[in-house]
Image: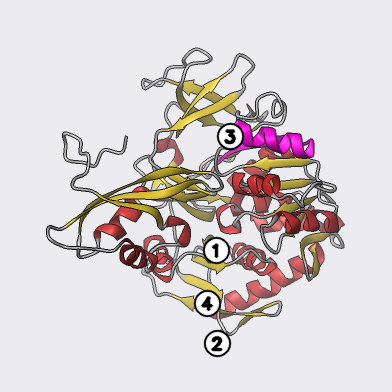
Amino acid sequence: MNFFDAIRDRNALYAPNAAVRTSEGAISYGSLLQQVERLADVFRQFGLVPGNCLGVVDRNSPEFIIAMLAGLKCDAVVLPIASNLTASEQEQLIHEAGLHAVLRESASGAVVIGVRIYALKLFAREQPRIAPHVPDAAFIRFTSGTTGTSKGVVIGHRSVIERVEAANTGLQLGPGDAVVWVLPMAYHFVVSVMLYLYHGATIVLSEDFTAEQIVRAAEASNAVLLYASPMHVRLLVSDPTCTSLGPLQRVISTSAGSSPELCASFFKKFGLPVSQAFGIIEVGLPIINMRSATEHPEAVGHALPDFEVAILDDALHPIPDGTVGQLALRGPGMFDGYLAPPVLRGDILRDGWFLTGDLATRGADGLITVRGRSKSMINVAGNKVFPEEVEAVINAHPFVVGSRVRGGAHALLGEIVEADVVLKADVVLDVEDLIAHCRKHLTVHKLPQRIRFVAQLPMTVTGKVRRG
């Protein structure tokens, strides 16, 4: 079944209910679905055909949701693209994915969604279908691999339905429930946004991420859930004017780990625990800390009913509770394959397990705590940064010999990007000049916040930069 059809059929009885709410008003499910149908007709007229891949570049907005669903309605495969990526980053993504079409806001465009104008650009491709090895492909998301390189994850319609049904066994959302949304939609579309629409909830878009606006959005919509990152939790704790969360009953933090100290401060101030959640694009949302958030805020929680979790050693053997090992998952709604090279899920799983690349422990009652990451990824306020990508930009400067990028602790953002840089002999380079060079090629959260010029970098015996 096409996932858009599933959303339409499930919400037929709730057409008057609000699907998306902004400061300008609400869009009902009936209106949302009608706009999707009309936009799908426009896409077809422009030449979008089943199997094509449509990239949608936009900020958090009802229009973003409508465009993504219209692509699904056309039986195309859709790729959400964050609008805060630089032009060069967007073009690289378009090239790597081999997109057939891209939709982005443009004053000279010919596609109208609501009151905004978009341009739809089509590309000539030899292959009319993207990811033909996944017959019912619905979404593509780019994420990290175990080496830190980006991989295109392909998720089919059936898998999306399975994962949003499985994740809601923990969230327990239904028609009329409102969720305050502050995270970038492009990075959380396949599980979170689709889950809310599938189950008839209302997505409340906050105008900005200040504590005042988050609470105002919650009060205006009688929202029950705030789905956020540790950065938003810190902002709520640190704002002295924010003394109440209004109608909010649950706060879930994802994208990066929240410290026990932060969670304790939040609970002391508002009387609500912060429930951490473990989400991963290949699997969905298999673990949420709903039962032990007050006593063990550092944990990501227990596996939801439909999922299995194992802690394995390097030989993929289970290890005793309390021992640090590889976090492995299996359950419904897992990804169907990778885009390039084309690989199916069965060729990736190890004895049926997906290895997350995270190191974790499990308590006797099944409580999972992530202890570290085997990958080199840096989390900047919930935004993922790959050191290799930043290093490639730094190393492209004509005065640079080499660099090492890593994460550094930051009180608000969790981590920031730090870089050690080796310059060519007898040259002088100002730090601000190097940052200006990076700014041309990198999104703001990927920019190095601390740069040290060093004589040499620590290297392994095989000639690679040592990250430890």
- Counting residues from the N terminus, which is met first, the one under dot 4 or under dot 2? 4
- Who is closer to the viewer here, 194 or 385? 385
Label 1: few (<14), some (14–19) or many (≥20) C-alpha neighbours in 10 Å: many
Residue lying at 25% horizontally and 58% vertically, measured from the top left? 395
Q: Is residue 363 above or below residue 48?
A: above
Q: Which mark is residue 135?
A: none
Residues in magenta?
258-279
Left or right position of 56 against 288: left
Q: Is residue 269 left or right of residue 464?
A: right
> What residue is drawn where x is 84% and y is 55%?
219
- What residue type is disc 3 on? Ser
Give the labeled residue for mark 1.
76
Chain-order first, disc 4 or disc 3: 4
Residue that carries the numbered disc 2 in the rendered image:
108
- Colour scheme of the rendered structure: secondary structure
Whole-number angstrom distance, CA of label 4 to CA of label 1: 11 Å
Q: Secondary structure at mark 2?
A: loop
Q: Upstream in the sequence, badge 1 or badge 3?
A: 1
Separation (CA) of disc 4 from disc 3: 49 Å
Q: Amino acid at mark 2?
A: Ser
Pointer 2: residues within 10 angstroms few (<14), some, or many (20+)? few
Reading the image, the residue beneath label 3 is 259
Q: Residue at x 59, y 52 (%)?
A: 188
For disc 4, the marked residue is: 47
Q: Position of residue 421 (x, y in %)?
A: 26, 52
Sequence-first tag of 4 and 1: 4
41 to 308, vertically: above or below: below
